[in-house]
């Protein structure tokens, strides 16, 4: 009996410590322009954040990217570039801020792009991003960009609580059989 209570306590602690899953998808397409010059084209999808998405930042590794230029955003979005600097050392980033309310839950938007010099050996790949609350500058979501051709489709997943309850019940049954 006490073993089941301990398992239940562990289950409650695990549920309380779980971080929420990411709800934002940023897809990209990399286009080779010439020489080391490439362009990323991005699309943004607010899959389930309850508040409108009004600011996001994409990061560029200082060892792989240089010369970020030609930042373009759709109407109503303002962009900012910070160059990667290996001497500091510091990664670069681009940041977009919505000027008119942002992207509502369930909506998606394309038209974001940046040109850069690629210093890596293969083709440019996915990048880390943060979704920010523009009023408090707190990170509300993070993730990695996804190649547009390989963008995931929405697949329902079982709830965390249900999976953990199922595991707890299985552990209690196994414990009871051993005794």
Image: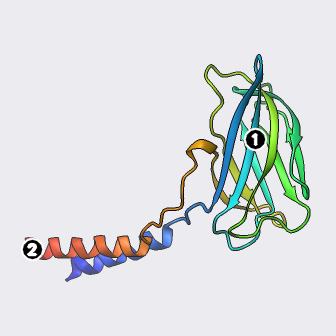
Number of dots carrying numbers:
2
Q: Residue furthest front?
A: 149
Task: Determine which of the numbered discs, if any, sits on residue 177 in the image.
Answer: 2
Image coordinates of residue 28 in percent, x first then y, are: 68, 43
| Element under disc 1 | strand
Q: Residues within 10 Å of mark 1 (few under 14, many from 20)?
A: some
Task: Determine which of the numbered discs, if any, sits on residue 57 in the image.
Answer: none
Q: Is 179 on the left-hand or right-hand side of 74?
A: left
Front one among 123 and 88: 123
Tag nearer the camera, 2 or 1? 1
Front one among 29 and 90: 29
Image coordinates of residue 72 in percent, x first then y, are: 87, 43
Q: Is residue 110 shown to the viewer in this render?
A: yes
Image coordinates of residue 32 in percent, x first then y, are: 73, 26
Q: Is 129 on the left-hand or right-hand side of 134?
A: left
Residue lying at 90% horizontally and 66% vertically, measured from the top left: 100
Front one among 154 and 7: 154
Q: Is residue 90 shown to the viewer in this render?
A: no
Q: Residues within 10 Å of mark 2 (few under 14, many from 20)?
A: few
* CA distance for labels 2 and 1: 57 Å
């Amino acid at each position: 009996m006490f073993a089941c209570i301990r398992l239940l306590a562990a289950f409650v602690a695990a549920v309380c410590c779980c971080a929420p899953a990411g709800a934002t998808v940023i897809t990209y397409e990399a286009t080779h322009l010439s020489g080391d010059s490439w362009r990323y084209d991005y699309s943004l999808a607010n899959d389930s954040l309850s508040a409108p998405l009004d600011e996001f930042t994409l990061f560029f590794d200082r060892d792989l990217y240089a010369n970020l230029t030609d930042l373009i955003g759709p109407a109503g979005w303002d962009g900012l570039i910070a160059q990667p600097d290996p001497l500091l050392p510091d990664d670069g980033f681009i940041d977009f801020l919505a000027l008119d309310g942002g992207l509502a839950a369930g909506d998606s938007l394309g038209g974001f792009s940046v040109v850069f010099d690629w210093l890596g050996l293969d083709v440019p790949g996915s990048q880390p991003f943060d979704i920010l609350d523009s009023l408090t500058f707190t990170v509300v979501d993070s993730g990695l960009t996804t190649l547009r051709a390989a963008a995931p489709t929405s697949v329902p997943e079982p709830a965390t609580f249900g999976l953990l309850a199922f595991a707890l019940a299985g552990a209690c049954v196994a414990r009871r059989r051993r005794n």
